[in-house]
Amino acid sequence: MPLPLIIGGLAAVAGAAGIGSGIHGGVKMKEAKDTMNLAKRKHERAVNRYEEKNKETTALMDSIGKRELKIVASFKTFSDIIEQIQGRPDFNIQLGGMDLPQYQADELRKISNGAVEILGSITTAGIAGSLAASGVTTAVTAFGAASTGTAISGLSGAAATNATLAAIGGGSLASGGGGMALGSAILGGATLGVGLLVGGAILGVTGSKLSDQADEAYRQASRTEEQVDKIVGYLKELTDVAESFELSLMEVEAQYKKRLARLDEIVNYYGKKNWYDFTGDEKELTKSTVLLVGMLNKMCKTKLVVENHAEDGINIVNKYEVRSVVSKADQVLGKVRAGF
């Protein structure tokens, strides 16, 4: 059973238990109340664990997504500079057999325009994280913004799905879907429902009925705890992979921005527009910048999460591909620092 349904069911049980008339069986009442208190504490601990890890993961994914969008948005500046250089080579740079995206001005401008539009549309945390999970460059293209200037449809709707986790794959814990997007409304209602069972609303329930409801609530809380354990484990794995990826992305971005600023100075301040007027160091700088753009483009295409097609499976942290692209990023950094 999906976690939201388990939690929602707990709330329903709690609400139903608050209706009735008369109290009988003081001993059963005391036992039931003790059991419900245990269920409530168990449930609250599970919810708090989930919310804490959810918040941490959402913040991290959002940070990565926004960084990637800003990087992609800068590709137009890079293209505008590089296109001014007459007689430049094709820059078909290979790196250890890795398929880096080759420089294509139209493509870079297209995704850059799309990234700018998305950045201007983001008002709620979670959208950028969703894009990072699915690969910013790919997601920007899929949204269809690009050079057409078309408004990005459904952006606000995606933001309303409880931050990043709903979009990092739908979060299906079971065929019903929606497992990871717990939803603040469901959580709030469930917590309130359990509170009703141990508060004044229990005064209308018979002792035996209350005991049955309390036992069921405890079983539901235990199942909730088990599902939260799975989700928190998943989020920890995602966080570990995402932190490694973000660190690598930041290092490549830093080298790129430094070289882009220098290339802008060469072309637009000193006015060098012909490749043959470039010094050896300036040519090396240009090649390094192109290589870094290709690496960043590759990283921004990389999905941090891939869909699990199993009927009841949590989506998969794309750790092997992420590790591969981080390794290649290290190679690129070594190459540009050492020179060609």
Image (cartoon, helix red, strand yellow):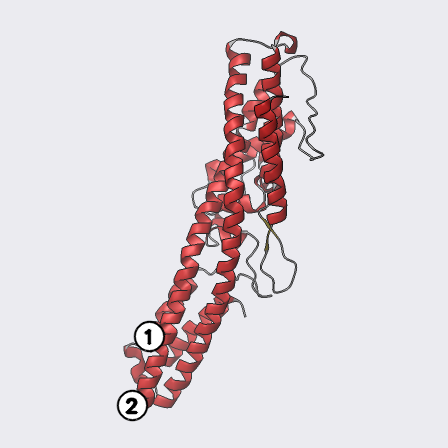
| Occupied quadrant, residue 14 | bottom left
Q: Which residue, given by chain and number where applicable, does mark 1 sit on?
A: 196
Residue type (three-letter) at the residue carrying disc 1: Leu
Is 140 or 34 nearer to us in this picture? 34
- Point out residue 206 in the picture as x, y percentages from the top left corner: 35, 89
- Point out residue 43 in the picture as x, y percentages from the top left corner: 40, 69
- Give the label on residue 258, or none: none
Confirm whether residue 18 shows in the render: no
Query: Dot 2, how many residues are within 10 Å of its Cα: few (below 14), some (14-19), or many (20+)?
Result: few
Q: Is 301 above or below relative to 1?
A: above
Q: Secondary structure at mark 1?
A: helix
Query: Dot 1, how many residues are within 10 Å of its Cα: few (below 14), some (14-19), or many (20+)?
Result: some
Q: Residue at x 64, y 25 (%)?
A: 105
Q: Is 22 above or below relative to 160?
A: below
Q: Residue at x 48, y 59 (%)?
A: 232
Q: Disc 2 or 1, which lies upstream in sequence?
A: 2
Q: Which residue, given by chain and number where applicable, does mark 2 sit on?
A: 26
Q: Residue at x 51, y 40 (%)?
A: 246
